[in-house]
Amino acid sequence: MRMLLNIKLPNTEFNAAVRDGSVGNKMGQILEEMKPEAAYFTEQGGQRSALLIVDIDDPAKIPTLAEPWFLTFNANVELKVIMTPEDLKRAGLEELGKKWST
């Protein structure tokens, strides 16, 4: 199951890690453990943030995606199931449209 993690990093906690020199190690450790398919870093609402694409085979693994961010940076983490164009083609939208448009 492919997921998008939208991680918002509070300035106070992240700034502290930048100032004490631990931010690179902390971020590297989390990303190495997660092994995202893609990782992008940006700003959202005045906060540093990360957008990660990950693929998991078991919903029970969701805490392994979120907890490192919660515990390390007090981050806000949103998880969304996402699809590729190929996944969407296999979704059967035409059949669903016929079934539910009556």
Image (tube, rainbow, N blue to C red):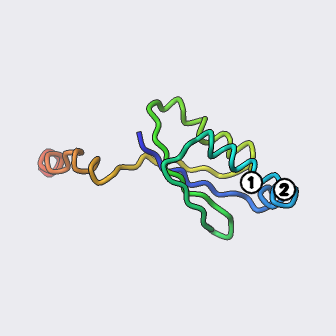
SS class, disc 2: loop
Amino acid type of the residue that numbered disc 1 sits on in the rendered structure: Gly
Q: In the orientation shown, which residue stands out farthest toward the right? A: 20
**Image quadrant where one finds the N terminus:** top left
Label pair 1/2, CB-CB below 8 angstroms = yes
**Badge 1, how many Cα within 10 Å: few under 14, some, many 20+?**
few
Q: Is residue 69 left or right of residue 53?
A: right
| Residue sitting at x 69%, y 57% | 9
Query: Which quadrant of the view contains residue 13?
Result: bottom right
Question: x%, y% of residue 8?
Answer: 64, 57
Question: x%, y% of residue 61?
Answer: 54, 32
The one of 22 and 95 positioned closer to us in this rendering: 22
Question: x%, y% of residue 63?
Answer: 60, 35
**Badge 2, how many Cα within 10 Å: few under 14, some, many 20+?**
few
Residue of label 2 = 21
Q: Is residue 2 left or right of residue 101?
A: right
Q: Mark number for residue 24?
A: 1
Q: Is residue 99 left or right of residue 69?
A: left
SS class, disc 1: helix
The one of 36 and 82 positioned closer to us in this rendering: 36
| Residue sitting at x 35%, y 49% | 83
